[in-house]
Image (spheres, rainbow, N blue to C red):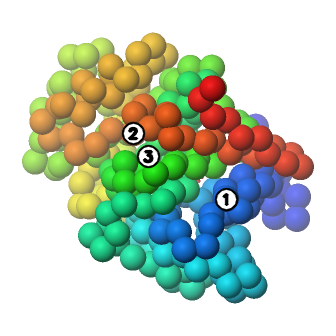
Amino acid sequence: MKEKPLHGETSVDRMKREAGIHAAELVEDGMIIGLGTGSTTLYAMEHLSVLIEENGLRIQGVPTSFQTEMRARQLQIPLTTLDASPELDLAIDGADQVDPDLRLIKGRGAAMTREKCVAAAAGELVIVVDAGKCVRSLTGPVPLEVIPFALHPVILGIRAMGGIPVLRNGIRKDGPVITDNGNFVLDCSFGEILEPERLEGILTLIPGVLSCGLFCEFVEKTTVVVGEEGGCRELKRS
Ligand code: 5RP
């Protein structure tokens, strides 16, 4: 059942806010940081904007979507690009599921391709989630960004693997979602994902798949900040 918002903010919103603020406090003066996409990252950006204005924090951010870029401009967070700054100190981003080994499913916002580029470029990856995103094992669906030219061969390939691909449709837009890179998104269900690294490798190798929402390769540099009611906890690989 969907929770009724109290004063317009749900308990999940509060958990996201806690995580976002905590992540923003990890950013140090002079850093160049990746700015992920989604509501939890936006809370981090709002707090970064306060730190810039009130504490004189000097940072530059690389946005991973049009949404993030527009919000960063409103919040007066200075921006740069991966071309100008191919090595980032840290990236802050959200996730849809996090397992105990800190492997992730991302891409509800269809921004996973740029998010993966930014995560790869970052020295540290700070993932901000509400407590409900932490799961015992990843169950998907796994979003794939697919070039329109190859949509049907990719659908056949996913079915041949036993997956169920669903083309993501727009809301308040007829037809498929078009990503910031001009491509489609296939949400692919595989049930419980027992070997996420293996599945990520296989999916990424399908011709026409630009990127996959499984993020398994960054666990060693990942800190997950889990927002809870009245605080948060950090998870790292021990
Ligand atoms: C966008 C993402 C988001 O980071 C993820 O969906 C989490 O979003 P939110 O913080 O709004 O729950 O992967 O592509």
Is residue 208 or residue 164 the one in the foreground?
208
- Identify the residue shown where x is 59% and y is 59%: 41
* Mark 2–mark 3 CB contact (< 8 Å): yes
Q: Position of residue 60 (x, y in %)?
A: 49, 75
Check disc 3 and report the residue beneath it: 107
The residue where tag 1 is placed is 26
Residue 3 shows up from this direction: no
**The quarter of the displayed image where residue 198 is located:** top left
Three-letter code, disc 3:
Gly
**Disc 3 residue lies near ligand 1 with CB under 8 A:** yes
In the depicted view, which residue is nearer to us: 196 or 218? Answer: 218
| Quadrant placement of the C terminus | top right
Mark before the other along the chain sequence, 1 or 2:
1
Give the side of residue 23 with respect to residue 156, left or right. Answer: right
Which of labels 3 and 1 is toward the front? 1
Q: Residues within 10 Å of mark 2 (few under 14, many from 20)?
A: many
Q: Amino acid at mark 2?
A: Gly
Residue 171's disc is: none
Residue 160 is at least partly visible in this image: yes
Q: Secondary structure at mark 2?
A: loop
Tag of residue 213: 2
